[in-house]
Image (cartoon, rainbow, N blue to C red):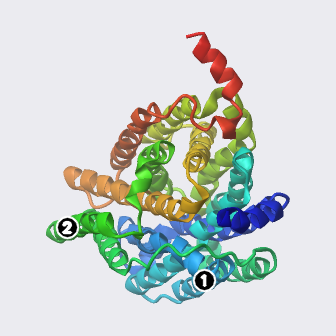
Amino acid sequence: MSDQIYQAPMVRRAAPNFRVIAMIVASAMLMENIDATVLATALPTMARDFSVSAPAMSIALTSYLLSLAIFIPASGRMADSFGSRTVFRAAIAVFVIGSILCALAPTLSFLVLARLLQGLGGAMMMPVGRLVLMRSVARKDMVSAMSWLLVPALIGPIVGPPLGGFIVTYLDWRWIFYINVPIGIIGMIFVSIYIDEVKGKASGRFDTVGFVLSGISLGSLLFGFEMSSHEGEGAFSIFLIAIGLIFGIAYLRHARKHPSPIMDFSLMKVPSFGTSVIAGSLTRITQGAQPFLLPLLFQIGFGLSAAAAGQIVIATALGALAMKPMAKFVFSRLGFRRSLVLNGILGTVGYGLCAAFRPDWPMPFIFIVLILSAFFLSFQFTAYNTIAYDEIDRERMSSATSFYTTFQQLMLSLGICIGALALHGSMAFNDVETPTLGDFSTAFVVVTLISITATVWNLRFSPTAGEEISGYKPKRTKDVAGG
């Protein structure tokens, strides 16, 4: 009865306002996505300023995602303890401060530290914002809520590449980070006005030991993968990976005994959630690698300027944006299982075609391939993000959101690492210091081969998965009856 008293006011208030909340959370995503996509386009220019190779700049992307992976597990507990509005607003402030420090960075090492601070802010922004939205929307409106949440945020990837190309071509790359300042200030104002101060119920003491163990494990693994892509760092990378595995095993042993572990792996026993985590993680290998590999391919492999490369990469954002309004319609016709299988194959194979891109290919054709690939994969991630919570109780929503977002960001970071590792491995095999078109082809093939294995897990979704969300039940019943 106490649960009903706690939740009922939220449901009544949130019904007409979940779109407003989604737009506010999307603004935080906008800030993060502009930052990430602009930075990816500017990596070669920044590499020259820091006197390092362009592939070595992948650590500027990885360090941010690393910070997300370490701190996201604590985000749900922080929101429950201090209130969603307080944590969300503070997270935006930390992100803005980190952005300013990035703009002032004199060396790559300083930039990495500033990116880690940015990641701390980002780690609290996204899962807390998503948690507020998930608690505020009925299951039947979940697809629409996710569309409202994700569509405005896609403005970031659309604006990012050409904006990044313009900045590094005509201005200074440091302006990339100053852009976040006005967006962050506006975001904090709207959070203060529209987001309620919601606190969750106490779920036992904070898992400090688990937080330390998981942080060391994730940090060591990701930096180990990152260092393995750098020449002469093989022994150190193996050491880091070993440390990560050891602490990961220690965390799993600890989590079995703790009443409220920082990452609750028992959630993986929930069919739709566990399958979505695994299949989504595999697919995100490609999603993580693309923002790193594509700008480098067009600038180094094709010899294009940063501005020209940005104009091509914008195709991925346009394709993703075009899919969002169609999500609910497609779900209602195909259901989640068939949609995930079909779109996963089409999107991943489409990105695999990037391995065949060559400078003499017609640019309109390359542009269309990127649009279609992003079109299908965008649908894929909308489906994963929605179906994951179909069977999750409201009491576990905070833990589930933190857990899911941790793996989401972990695999994005791993995608960058695998892409960089494949690129460096091919360069070492061919004994070249600057990546060639063949080296980029190898990297694209490696990441897409990993992601296509998600099809096996997509087939494990129940045929009736998410029927309440998709509205596909009548048609599915007819299909089952007909054999």
Furthest residue toward left: 235
As drawn, is 197 to the left or to the right of 462? right
**Residue under the image location 42 percent in, 80 percent down:** 112
As drawn, is 149 to the left or to the right of 202? right
Image location of residue 376, percent across then percent down: 59, 38
Query: Considering depth in this image, is 480 or 182 the residue closer to the camera?
Result: 480
Image location of residue 479, percent across then percent down: 62, 16
As drawn, is 420 to the left or to the right of 430? right
Within-10-Å neighbours for mark 1: few <14, some 14–19, many 20+:
some
Furthest residue toward top: 482
- Looking at the picture, which amino acid does disc 2 mark? Ile
Residue underneath mark 1:
82
Q: Where, quadrant-wise, is the C terminus in this rendering? A: top right
Residue underneath mark 2:
246
Closer to the chain start, of discs 1 and 2, is 1
- Looking at the picture, which amino acid does disc 1 mark? Phe
Query: Considering depth in this image, is 73 or 292 the residue closer to the camera?
Result: 73
Image location of residue 237, percent across then percent down: 21, 68
Image location of residue 443, percent across then percent down: 35, 48
Tell whether label 2 touches label 1 (CB within 8 Å): no
As drawn, is 259 to the left or to the right of 245? right
Residue 283's image quarter?
A: top left
Q: Where, quadrant-wise, is the N terminus in this rendering? A: bottom right
Against 385, residue 246 (above or below) is below
Which SS class for mark 2?
Answer: helix
Q: Is residue 449 visible?
A: yes
**Residue under the image location 47 percent in, 35 percent down:** 458
- Pair 1/2: label in front: 1
Against 74, residue 278 (above or below) is above
Which SS class for mark 1?
Answer: helix
Residue 310's image quarter?
A: bottom right
